[in-house]
Image (cartoon, rainbow, N blue to C red):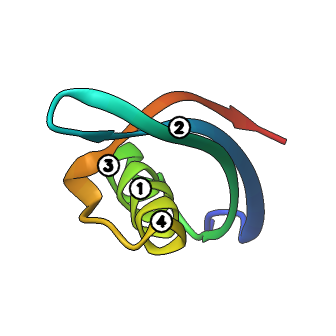
């Protein structure tokens, strides 16, 4: 029996930190195709990368405050 193949949609609230201070915040959405058990680390990495791209910062500057499946 094969695993269900579906796309799941996520929403995250985040802050951007620089020198220990929050300098920006925002929200980001991301959709991922799920073929098996999804690794939570892959979702977190994708959300942080998307947010970092929006603010042109390194992913290490992004602090995810909450992740929700839509």
Point out which mark residue 48 bears: 1
Q: Quadrant of the C terminus?
A: top right
Label 2, label 1: how many angstroms apart (C-alpha)?
8 Å
Q: Residue at position x 62%, y 65% from top?
A: 1
**Residue at the disc numbered 3:** 41
**Answer yes or no: do the residues labelled 2 and 3 have beta carbons within 8 Å?**
no
Front of the two marks 3 and 1? 1
The local secondary structure at tag 4 comes to helix
Front of the two marks 4 and 2? 4
Residue 48 at x, y = what percent?
41, 55
Work out whether mark 1 precedes mark 4 in sequence or the reverse, and give the earlier one.
Answer: 1
Residue 56 at x, y = what percent?
39, 73
Q: Residue at position x 37%, y 59% from top?
A: 42
**Answer yes or no: do the residues labelled 2 and 1 have beta carbons within 8 Å?**
yes
Label 4 packing within 10 angstroms: few (<14), some (14-19), many (20+):
some
**Residue at the disc numbered 4:** 55
Point out which mark residue 14 bears: 2
**Answer yes or no: do the residues labelled 3 and 1 have beta carbons within 8 Å?**
no
Q: Residue at position x 28%, y 59% from top?
A: 59
Q: Is residue 38 above or below residue 31?
A: above
Label 4, label 2: how many angstroms apart (C-alpha)?
11 Å
Q: Is residue 55 above or below residue 15?
A: below
Residue 7 at x, y = what percent?
76, 67
Front of the two marks 3 and 4? 4
Point out which mark residue 25 bears: none
Q: Is residue 5 left or right of residue 14?
A: right
Q: Is residue 28 above or below residue 4?
A: above
**Answer yes or no: do the residues labelled 4 and 2 have beta carbons within 8 Å?**
no
């Amino acid at each position: 029996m094969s695993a269900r193949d579906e796309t799941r949609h996520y929403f995250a609230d985040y802050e951007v930190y620089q020198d220990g201070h929050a300098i920006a915040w925002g929200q980001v959405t991301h959709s991922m195709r799920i073929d098996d058990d999804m690794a939570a680390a892959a979702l977190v990495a994708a959300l942080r990368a998307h947010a970092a791209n929006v603010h042109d910062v390194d992913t290490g500057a992004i602090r995810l405050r909450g992740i929700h499946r839509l």
